[in-house]
Amino acid sequence: MPERLLNRAIIVVGAGTGIGAATVERLCTEGARVCVADVNLAAAKAVAARMVDAGHEAHAIAVDITDEAAVNACFAEAVAKLGGLDGAHINAADLRTIFLDSDALSLNMATFDRTIAVNLRGHLLCTRAALPHLIESDHGAIVYTSSGACISGEPERPSYAASKGGLNALMRHVASKWGKQGVTANCVAPGFVMTPEMIAGGAVPPEWIERCIAGTRSTRLGKAEDIAAMVALLLSEDGRWINGQVFHVNGGALLT
């Protein structure tokens, strides 16, 4: 694989499992030096250890993106260990709230507040911590994990959709404000991705998988590696003239 990211210093927040872990592996394979950040430090350490065993440079840091002091400390440590920061993939989410995110009438406001705290406020905190260093880099790039839920008009998950719509707006603000200083900002909006954890757990019924495949213009559901590939592109020189965009990587389930 071409080393498009050779020696680039990149942090992935929400990297202990799923899309984040796959992104770390893709970035390392392309030559990046990666900080693996996650609220679950054990999971982050496991990902970093696999990368180091494979001959790559990676280290793990614990971070709760709802805690401003913790976010600032995480990025400061990452920058110190990496010697700077060229890119960031902000991928963190509290997936437990999705199952409680009902509708605007019956929604418990604690669920809404938690969703916004992680998916939007937390991403803003990470942005504030990353930006000074990305501006110093001559190829600073930030990629957020969004979702097609913000435009699909679902009858449920209003908190999640609102948070991702806000995240898209935050991304466009960053691209508009700091694009002239060499920073690119983009979102990747995954479709239904079968992560390794979902596959291993066997929690997704076969009939649901068949239903989801039927709703796409593809022969399969997504893999974490599909999203990681797009993130790697947007963090690389190949993505330098891409700024302020939302990329829907979903097998054609949602056409925009």
Image: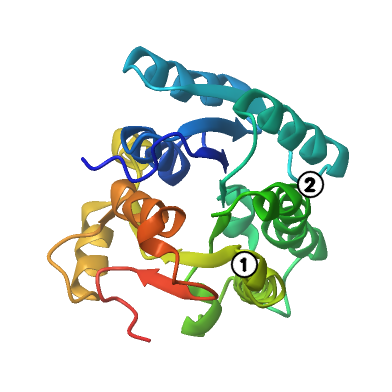
Can you tell which of label 2 and label 1 is closer to the viewer? 2
Q: x and y percent of residue 255 in the render? A: 32, 84
Q: x and y percent of residue 160 in the render? A: 62, 67
Kind of residue at disc 2: Thr
User: Could you say which quadrant of the image residue 21 lies in?
Assistant: top left
Which of pointers 2 and 1 lies earlier in the amino acid sequence?
A: 2
Kind of residue at disc 1: Tyr
Question: Compared with residue 169, is residue 112 higher up or lower down, i.e. above or below?
Answer: above
Work out which quarter of the rendered image holds the C terminus and state it. Answer: bottom left
Work out which quarter of the rendered image holds the N terminus and state it. Answer: top left
User: Could you say which quadrant of the image residue 113 lies in?
Assistant: bottom right
Q: Residue at x 23, y 74 (%)?
A: 216
Q: Is residue 30 left or right of residue 126?
A: left
Q: Residue at x 71, y 79 (%)?
A: 104
Q: How is the image coloured?
A: rainbow
Q: Is residue 69 left or right of residue 168?
A: right
Residue pointed to by mark 1? 160
Mark seen at residue 66:
2
